[in-house]
Image: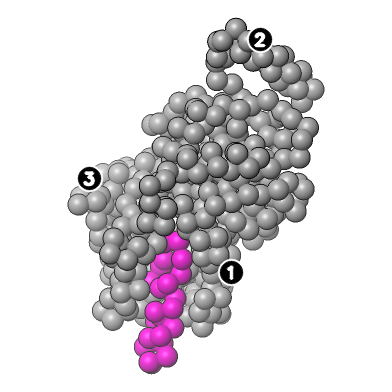
């Protein structure tokens, strides 16, 4: 099959030369294959060492270098505050000028830029981390042969985070530190709530008594003068009887605030996000971290770009239920933190085993925040209903859309 693809790619390249000689541009197609050393580029929305989202991507790039012998180029802090006057697609051009044959855009807010870049550079492979541009069953589908969407099914990780928070909470009040509001962040916050509600009841409590509040800061991390300060938001939670705060932003600043308050005698804890080692920021208050492991899927995609088997795909990769923390096979994992009590850790393991066995918390009856029915009793949500969740869920406090 790869031999056939290589022959077709060679014929396509020859056609490009012929058409170029005639002054005619060929139709967009997947980039041709080269035997030169493979260089890939990565655009990171935050610092490469943020102990969160961007570091998880950066280390996935190092994983690819080690596994495939490829070379990574990267630019970090790709956001309007740190790089005013530039756009991600312009910065991607810089990576290509340095030799990148594939570029990874690592943030949902780069979606439009990744599409524009892919269309303008059909000879370059593009990975959009999150996004739905090439999902044939999605709302934004547009055939783009050189673009692939990759996202982990973090809904499972967030359910685990919510479960750990509910088991550890003594007040029954859980805060959720949200970034900006979009489809992705709504469904992840809602998944954390579903996990919390399930485990709160499992522990013998009335789920109606659980309080779950989401406060959105306005971006993936703090931008002074632009977003709410996530440290202050965390403090507001912890000082109003929310004894566990789940992070949904790109770095674990909630843990630092919890550690400070714990040193003052307050019994609080937190759940980190994104990066496998995020608990290291404040281990004594960390219940755990649901994390993305981008390395395996990036390695598959980059290998296919290099060997000529590339196809444009929408990949929503779940945990490897045989071992969710296998760094070679699982796209989503959960690392339990030192602050999680042994009994709670055992109950969390039971919950994870239930998920592995087919438990689906996205099963009705589920109402939206405004009280309207979203899933009827026994109805299982489709991927589209989860991905494009239009509101937070009934029982959650917080905005469902930007004001």
Image check: 37 left or right of 396?
Answer: right
Question: 369 or 72: which is nearer to us?
Answer: 72
Question: 126 or 86: which is nearer to us?
Answer: 86
Q: Give the mark, 2 or 3, whose residue is nearer the N terminus.
A: 2
Q: Give the mark, 1 or 3, whose residue is nearer the N terminus.
A: 1
Identify the mark at residue 18; answer none if there is no mark. 2
Q: Residue placed at 55% from the left, 20% from the top?
A: 28
Image check: 26 left or right of 87?
Answer: right
- Label 3 sits on a secondary structure element that is loop
Q: CA distance from mark 1 to mark 3?
A: 39 Å
Numbered range of the magenta stretch: 245-268
Q: How crowded is the residue under tag 2: few (<14 C-alpha within 10 Å), some, or many (20+)? A: some
Q: Residue placed at 63% from the left, 10% from the top?
A: 21
Nearer to us of marks 1 and 3 is 1
Q: Which residue is mark 3?
A: 372
Q: Give the mark, 1 or 2, whose residue is nearer the N terminus.
A: 2
- In this picture the colour scheme is one colour
Residue most extreme to the top: 22
Image check: 34 left or right of 105?
Answer: right
Residue 40: x %, y % from top left: 65, 43
Identify the mark at residue 277; answer none if there is no mark. 1
Discs 2, 3 touching: Cβ within 8 Å: no
Identify the mark at residue 296; answer none if there is no mark. none
Question: 315 or 43: which is nearer to us?
Answer: 43
Q: Residue placed at 47% from the left, 40% from the top?
A: 90
Q: Is residue 126 visible?
A: yes
Q: Is residue 38 magenta?
A: no
Q: CA distance from mark 2 to mark 3?
A: 59 Å
Q: Residue placed at 64% from the left, 37% from the top?
A: 101
């Amino acid at each position: 099959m790869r031999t056939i693809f290589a022959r077709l790619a060679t014929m396509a390249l020859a056609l490009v030369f012929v058409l170029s000689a005639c002054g005619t541009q060929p139709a967009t197609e997947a980039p041709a294959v080269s035997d030169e050393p493979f260089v890939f580029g990565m655009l990171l929305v935050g610092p490469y060492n943020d102990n969160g989202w961007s570091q998880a991507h950066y280390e996935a790039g190092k994983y690819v270098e080690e596994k495939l012998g490829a070379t990574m180029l990267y630019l970090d802090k790709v956001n309007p505050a740190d790089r005013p006057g530039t756009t991600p697609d312009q910065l991607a051009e810089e990576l290509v000028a340095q030799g990148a044959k594939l570029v990874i855009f690592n943030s949902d807010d780069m979606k439009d830029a990744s599409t524009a870049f892919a269309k303008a550079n059909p000879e370059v492979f593009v990975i959009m981390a999150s996004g739905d541009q090439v999902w044939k069953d999605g709302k934004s589908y547009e055939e783009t042969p050189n673009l692939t969407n990759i996202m982990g099914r973090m809904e499972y990780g967030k359910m685990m985070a919510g479960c750990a928070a509910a088991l550890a909470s003594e007040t029954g009040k859980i805060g959720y530190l949200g970034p900006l509001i979009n489809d992705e962040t709504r469904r992840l916050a809602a998944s954390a709530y579903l996990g919390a509600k399930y485990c709160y009841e499992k522990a013998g409590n009335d789920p109606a008594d659980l309080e779950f509040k989401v406060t959105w800061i306005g971006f993936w991390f703090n931008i002074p003068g632009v977003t709410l300060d996530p440290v202050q938001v965390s403090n507001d939670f912890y000082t109003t009887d929310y004894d566990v705060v789940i992070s949904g932003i790109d770095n674990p600043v909630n843990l630092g605030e919890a550690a400070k308050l714990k040193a003052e005698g307050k019994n609080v804890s937190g759940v980190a996000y994104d990066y496998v080692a995020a608990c290291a920021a404040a281990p004594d208050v960390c219940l755990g971290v649901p994390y993305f492991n981008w390395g395996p899927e990036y390695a598959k995609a980059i290998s296919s770009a290099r060997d000529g088997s590339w196809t444009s795909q929408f990949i929503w990769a779940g945990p490897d239920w045989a071992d969710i923390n296998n760094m070679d096979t699982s796209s989503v994992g959960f690392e339990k933190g030192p602050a999680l009590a042994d009994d709670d850790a055992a109950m969390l393991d039971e919950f994870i085993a239930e998920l592995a066995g087919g438990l689906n918390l996205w099963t009705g009856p589920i109402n939206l925040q405004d009280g309207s029915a979203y899933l009827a009793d026994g109805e299982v949500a489709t991927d589209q209903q989860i991905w494009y969740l239009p509101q937070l869920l009934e029982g959650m406090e917080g905005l469902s859309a930007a004001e």
